[in-house]
Image (cartoon, rainbow, N blue to C red):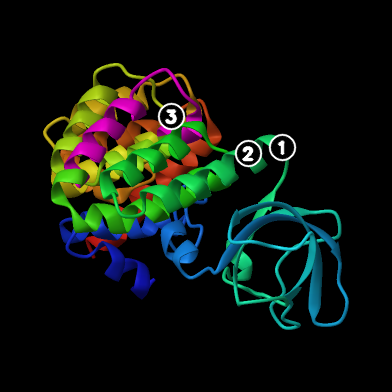
Amino acid sequence: MRGLLDSVQGLLPTGIALLVAAAALGQGHPLNVSRGRPLQERLTQADVIAVVEVAGFPPGRIDVTTREALLGELPAHFAIKRSRSTPPPLAVGDRALVPLRGARPPYVLVDQPAETIRLTDATAETRWADAVRGTLREQENPDALADLMLGWVDQGPAALRDTAFASLLPLLRASPALLERVALDRAKAATAEEGTRDARAVSAMLARMSPAGLDRLIQGLAGGSPLEETGLSVALRAGALANHAELPRLFARAVRAENAELRRAAVRNPSVIAVLGASGEAQLRQLAEEDPDEAVRRAANETLGRLHRARR
């Protein structure tokens, strides 16, 4: 947790930085948006990079067949060193994208086991190979690299979308102008009907990283843009920390939603109710007593209990 907090300090006000860190660790959100270190950092440590297919596991080794070399020259078949205590989660027949260190086989994996890029189908193989080529091409151009990564958010696949979030953080920390541009762009994406649910969720997490992006996100969601659980939770929590003027309108829209998951997401955070004051607590009590969904009533009662204990 400490390392991730350090990565966002100075990027945002403290409260928002904590939210970003929690989101990147996957806390409180259905998405796993933590895929280890930024991709550009991992690639710069590699001497060769390839898409491979696993052929076998002789002692201390992974035998692979080269499908495509993305950096450097590789033989058709070669070996990678395999740690007995922390092996990568691969099986015979799996395809993977592997950044490797070393002048000759057996190479050493750059990625930690949790960072292993396992390619589930031909689409994932193409998308990841293109992502690596683009990162190597644009690594000296932060604006172009950020735009490339925003494409990963929009188009996926899921693991590449998650990697985009972690990989964007150091770029945004280094450039306030880029941060502002990305946050505003992602606020628009998070409140649009186009795209996938997961893309809108990650976009919401990026949008709330600047005051202007958060404002556009909350204005859009409060004003009628599609509501989804993760984006709503992000906007409510960040809006409470910022004491945003539109927070009451967004909360009121959420608790009136037909979707019970949206109502439950709205009532689960005591900080939102605390900022809303008496009116928010009155709405919460009504939901705790009258909501037709048992899970919403239970969540509302739990939040009331947490508020009560905090006042002791």
Q: Which image quarter holds the C terminus?
A: bottom left
Q: Which of the 4 quarters of the picture holds residue 80? A: bottom right
Residue 68 versus residue 278 in the image, above or below: below
Q: Residue drawn 49% across and 28% down?
A: 260
SS for callout 2: helix
Q: Residue 300: where, in percent of width, then height?
A: 40, 41
Q: Are marks 1 and 2 in contact (CB under 8 Å)?
A: yes
- Whole-angstrom CA distance, mark 1 to mark 2, is 6 Å
Q: Nearer the viewer, residue 149 or 307?
A: 149
Q: Amino acid at mark 2?
A: Thr
Label drawn at residue 228: 3
- Disc 3 crowd rating (10 Å Cα; few below 14, some 14-19, many 20+) is many
- Quick check: can you spot residue 110? yes
* Mark positioned earlier in the residue sequence (2 or 3): 2
Q: Residue 106: where, in percent of width, then height?
A: 72, 77
Q: Are marks 2 and 3 in contact (CB under 8 Å)?
A: no
- Residue 111 placement, left or right of 53: left
Identify the residue position indicated by label 1 in the image.
122
- Whole-angstrom CA distance, mark 3 to mark 1, is 30 Å
Q: The magenta stretch spans which residues?
A: 179-200
Looking at the rendered image, the disc whose residue lies closer to the viewer, 2 or 3, is 2
Identify the residue position indicated by label 2 in the image.
126
- Whole-angstrom CA distance, mark 2 to mark 3, is 30 Å
- Quick check: can you spot residue 288? no
Q: Amino acid at mark 3?
A: Glu
User: Was residue 181 drawn as part of the magenta stretch in this picture?
Assistant: yes
- Disc 1 crowd rating (10 Å Cα; few below 14, some 14-19, many 20+) is few
Q: Amino acid at mark 1?
A: Ala
Q: Residue drawn 18% across and 61% down?
A: 14
